[in-house]
Image (spheres, grey):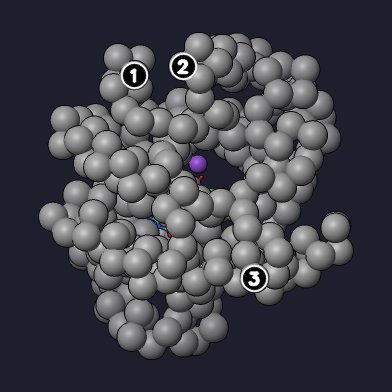
Amino acid sequence: LMLERDLGNALDNDEFALHLQLQVSPDGQPIGAESLLRWRRADGVLVPPDVFIPIAEKTGLIVPLGTWVLRQACLSWLRLSRAGHALPLSVNVSPRQFQQADFVDVVRSILAETGVPATQLIFELTEGLLVENMDATVARMHVLAELGIRFSIDDFGTGYSSLAYLQKMPLYELKIDKGFMRDMPHDVNGTALVKSILAMAGQLGLRVVAEGIETREQAQFLASHGKPCMQGFLFCRPMPLGELISQLEAAA
Ligand code: G
Ligand code: G
Ligand code: MN
Ligand code: NA
């Protein structure tokens, strides 16, 4: 309950920060970055998003917070672009945020205000949203796709989205949940699942990003099984924008 009260004030107190984690192509080149929200409370304690995002969803704070994240992501893109690294940014959009009546208008106005091309944003949606409210979700995705926004299904494989659903949506990408990567390539069931997701994505013409890549062994396994794009501590930790720019400069 105290966390709930603190969270309510955190936006006004400027306690949130957006970190970025690079995503790489099968041969290790940067292809984009995911924005990941961080909350450092006034007392200095860093509260993990898996703790505060569900609370923000419940209280409704996720709506103004999601707007802040989107604007902040666009400002980050501008700074990256000015530094010579115009990488597309992936933004997590929560179900409650996506379902707000004015969500499309909010997106439109932030794009207009910042001048960021819509094609530079990828919205990560979760399977829960698709199951809950399929028709309205698909319709809204088409409106945003018309603007140039691309879509990714986050934590893919943990929910219930069916092939029929996937075909109705203007999708660009699937992100394989990091849970499936953990015991790779030693876990036989996980390996089979990852292979079948890659085969299916291939059929549907979707890009795949495998998340949670921590070891060379995992990356090598993927290189010989479908070659998806990758994201994980092996390549880059989520970090503040300034650090990411320094890292990109050092690698260039
Ligand atoms: O690093 P990680 O602990 O950042 O993120 C944990 C969870 O929090 C992930 O499921 C991620 O999707 C979610 N998350 C991180 N940033 C955001 C955000 O800006 N908006 C929403 N809705 N979820 C986020
Ligand atoms: O939005 P999503 O649920 O996909 O959020 C990605 C989460 O995964 C974030 O919490 C991020 O900090 C975390 N993450 C990113 N790379 C790795 C990794 O290599 N290993 C683990 N365990 N977590 C990671
Ligand atoms: Mn994500
Ligand atoms: Na994920």
Left or right, 22 with respect to 251, comes to: left
Q: Amino acid at mark 3?
A: Arg
Cα separation, mark 1 vs mark 3, equals: 37 Å
Viewer can see residue 232: no
Mark 2, other Cα within 10 Å: few <14 / some 14–19 / many ≥20: some
- SS at circle 2: helix
Where on the picture, by quarter, is residue 246? bottom right
Left or right, 252 with respect to 230, comes to: right
- SS at circle 3: helix
Residue behind mark 3: 82
Q: Amino acid at mark 2?
A: Leu
Q: Position of residue 15 (x, y in %)?
A: 45, 81
Q: Position of residue 77 (x, y in %)?
A: 55, 64
Residue behind mark 2: 204
- Callout 1 touching callout 2 (CB < 8 Å): yes
Residue behind mark 1: 167
Left or right, 175 with respect to 97, comes to: right
Residue at point 66%, 34% (across, down):
229
Cα separation, mark 2 vs mark 3, equals: 35 Å
Q: Image quadrant for the N terminus?
A: bottom left
Q: Position of residue 36 (x, y in %)?
A: 52, 59
